[in-house]
Image (spheres, grey):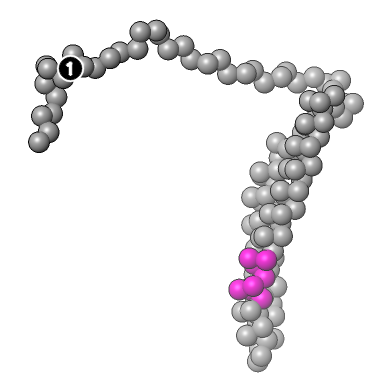
Amino acid sequence: MSEGFNENNANDLQLPTQPVTPTPTPSKPKFNLKDFLDFNTMVTPAFIKWYYIIGSVLAALSVFVFAVTVMMIGGFMVFAGLLVMLVGIPVALVLFRVSCELMAVIFSIHKELKRIK
């Protein structure tokens, strides 16, 4: 049976003897115009996430518009348009994701090479 909280087991609680100090967060380096103009500072990694979001929406929308256009022909093309929609949208999104990840990898390699240098 559970006794719950009472005065007897309140004495068993141990508090930390040393105060806990928060770890300092590293500050971001300041923007340097000379590094920016000499291409030592890369700005594209900051835009990759937004590029992926906007590009994914545009890729899915373009495949959808293409599929609807194909379905407007009629006949067998309705089935072909549905197939393009079901297969084309996931394939387009995966390929676009891979291209964004490749860009991220290239920039992380650049960052590590700068760190080694």
Q: Position of residue 106 (x, y in %)?
A: 79, 42
Secondary structure found at label 1: helix
Q: Nearer the viewer, residue 12 or 73?
A: 12
Residue 45 visible, this orientation:
yes
- Amino acid carrying label 1: it is Ala
Q: Nearer the viewer, residue 70 or 25?
A: 25
**Residue 114 appears left or right of 47:** right
**Residue 46 appears left or right of 15:** right
Judging by the rendered image, the residue that carries numbered circle 1 is 10
Q: Residue at x 67, y 21 (%)?
A: 28
What is the quadrant of residue 27 in the picture? top right
Residue range in magenta is 84-91
Q: Position of residue 3 (x, y in %)?
A: 10, 29
Measured along the vertical axis of the image, is residue 81 above or below residue 35? below
Q: Residue at x 67, y 66 (%)?
A: 91
Residue 36 visible, this orientation:
no
Q: Residue at x 64, y 50 (%)?
A: 53
Q: Residue at x 64, y 67 (%)?
A: 89
Residue density around tag 1, few if under 14, some if 14–19, many if 20 or more, within 10 Å: few
Query: Is 71 one of the magenta-colored residues?
Result: no
Q: Position of residue 39 (x, y in %)?
A: 87, 29
Q: Position of residue 76 (x, y in %)?
A: 66, 90
Query: Is 86 one of the magenta-colored residues?
Result: yes
Measured along the vertical axis of the image, is residue 62 above or below residue 30? below
**Residue 101 appears left or right of 11:** right
Q: Quadrant of the C terminus?
A: top right
Measured along the vertical axis of the image, is residue 44 above or below residue 94? above
Predominant SS of the magenta segment? helix
Measured along the vertical axis of the image, is residue 8 above or below residue 67? above
Q: Please give the count of numbered marks on the rendered protein.
A: 1
